[in-house]
Image (cartoon, grey):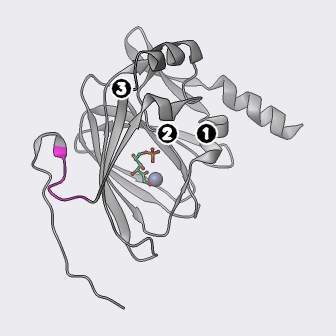
């Protein structure tokens, strides 16, 4: 087995962009079709151009157990209708894998749920560490006026299952009510579950 040397990098650049990274992923409005509950607001926004919603800087490591995949996630501020800019969200393909997030800047919420239907929402503020246990799907939501910036690390063999969330969304949505974030039920989630139960 090849043994890598230890390495370091800095997060001192403006916006916490890592001093070294291997992949820079940019997710725009067109990659979020079907994810926002206000489809009219989504279509109106998509028609105006392919706005950048969030970015991920990844350090490449082998996708193997024992490794830790890690990087910086930046969700920009904004809304589609009354719903804040957010990540797609996913389960890990190997469901029994955890993830750790450190909030570096901004304000937001992590929306989480299990396949059994349990759910949780935790506020993200600078300096807060969030442990996402095995089996919990997770989505970061930017509820503030500035970038929401987090450092993340998760097992190399975890993989990403986006399809489950693409189909039914999360149980809970984070929407602006009187200018403040509120947790509400996702009507679409219930519909799909009922259909699946038929
Ligand atoms: C990796 C992880 C984060 C997210 C990133 C973007 O397992 O949870 O690095 O990948 O915050 O979110 P998604 O991947 O849901 O588009
Ligand atoms: Zn993850």
Relative to 157, does residue 78 appear above or below in the rendering? Answer: above
Range of magenta residues: 16-21
Residue on which the image places disc 3: 143
Q: Residue at x 49, y 69 (%)?
A: 157
Q: For the point 43% across and 33% down, which residue is it?
A: 86
Q: How far apart are marks 1 and 3 (CA)?
A: 21 Å
* Label 1 with label 2: CB-CB less than 8 Å: yes
- 2 vs 3, front mark: 2
First along the sequence among labels 1 and 3: 3
Secondary structure at numbered mark 2: loop
* Marks 2/3: CA–CA distance: 15 Å
Name the residue rendered at 49%, 39% in the picture. 88
Ligand 1 near label 2 (Cβ, under 8 Å)?
Answer: yes
Outermost residue, right direction?
Answer: 198
Residue sitting farthest toward the top:
178
Binning the other alpha carbons within 10 Å of mark 1 as few (below 14), some (14 to 19) or many (20 upward) gives some
Residue position marked by numbered label 2 in the rendering = 88
Residue 47 % position (x, y)? 47, 16
Residue 82 seen: no
- By secondary structure, the bulk of the magenta-drawn segment is best described as loop
- Looking at the rendered structure, which numbered label has been put on residue 176? none
Can you give x and y, in whole percent of width and height, for residue 15 in the image?
A: 17, 40
> Is residue 92 covered in magenta?
no
């Amino acid at each position: 087995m090849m043994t890598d040397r230890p390495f370091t990098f800095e997060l001192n650049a403006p916006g916490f962009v890592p001093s070294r990274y291997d992949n820079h992923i940019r997710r725009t409005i067109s990659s979020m079709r079907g994810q926002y509950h206000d489809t009219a607001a989504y279509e109106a926004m998509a028609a105006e151009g392919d706005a950048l919603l969030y970015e991920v800087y990844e350090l490449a490591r082998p996708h193997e157990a024992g490794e830790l995949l890690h990087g910086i996630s930046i969700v920009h501020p904004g809304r589609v209708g009354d719903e804040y800019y957010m990540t797609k969200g996913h389960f890990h393909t190997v469901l029994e894998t955890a993830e750790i997030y450190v909030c570096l800047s901004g304000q937001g919420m992590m929306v989480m749920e299990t396949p059994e239907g349990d759910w949780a929402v935790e506020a993200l503020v600078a300096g807060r560490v969030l442990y996402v246990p095995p089996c919990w799907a997770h989505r970061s939501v930017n509820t503030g006026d500035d970038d929401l910036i987090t450092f993340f690390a998760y097992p190399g063999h975890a993989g990403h299952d986006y399809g489950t969330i693409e189909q039914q969304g999360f149980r809970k949505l984070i929407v602006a009510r009187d200018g403040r974030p509120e947790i509400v039920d996702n009507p679409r989630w219930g519909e799909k579950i009922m259909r699946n139960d038929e």
